[in-house]
């Protein structure tokens, strides 16, 4: 898509996070469906140019600068959550629950 070439791909899997019928030629995973998609991409120049323009816009949304910005935002949210909840709080809850389980287990242990 970034190279400005038609994307002809199966209509399934992870590529559907960015590829759709508006910016790519998606086909069922059969030889006939792929042949039809290739033929359409080659013969319909107007549709090809429209899809290629949409594909270029899509690649801008998934460029490295946008992807890294999204990761930084995610890290910022996780850090803020960590600061609010604190690992110490979770660890303290876990230790308390662990002590309670051990106490329960001693209640049922043979004397």
Image: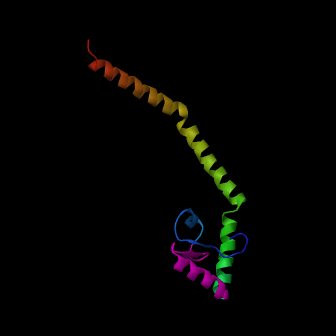
Q: Where is residue 22 in the image (x, y as percent from the top left)?
A: 59, 77
Q: Residue pushed farthest front?
A: 31
Q: Look at 26% across and 15% down and name the residue there.
A: 110
Q: Which of 67 and 88 is in front in this view?
A: 67
Is the N terminus in the top left, top right, bottom left or bottom right quadrant? Answer: bottom right
Q: Where is residue 69 in the image (x, y as percent from the top left)?
A: 68, 55
Q: Look at 58% across and 45% down and name the residue there.
A: 78
Q: Where is residue 8 in the image (x, y as percent from the top left)?
A: 61, 74
Q: Where is residue 95 in the image (x, y as percent from the top left)?
A: 45, 26
Give yes or no for residue 68 being in the magenta stretch. Answer: no
Placement of 99 over or under 8, stated as above or below: above
Q: Nearer the viewer, residue 96 or 60?
A: 60
Q: Look at 55% across and 35% down and name the residue there.
A: 86
Q: Look at 64% across and 73% down and name the residue there.
A: 7
Q: Which of 25 and 73 is in front in this view?
A: 25
What stretch of residues is rendered in magenta? 20-45
């Amino acid at each position: 898509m970034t190279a400005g070439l038609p994307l002809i791909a199966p209509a399934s899997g992870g590529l559907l996070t960015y590829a759709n019928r508006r910016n790519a030629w998606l086909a069922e995973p059969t030889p006939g469906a792929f042949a039809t998609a290739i033929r359409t991409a080659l013969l319909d120049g107007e549709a090809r140019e429209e899809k290629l323009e949409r594909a270029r816009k899509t690649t801008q949304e998934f460029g490295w600068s946008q992807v890294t910005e999204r990761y930084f935002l995610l890290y910022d949210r996780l850090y803020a959550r960590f600061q609010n909840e604190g690992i110490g709080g979770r660890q303290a809850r876990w230790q308390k629950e662990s002590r309670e389980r051990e106490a329960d287990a001693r209640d049922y242990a043979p004397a």
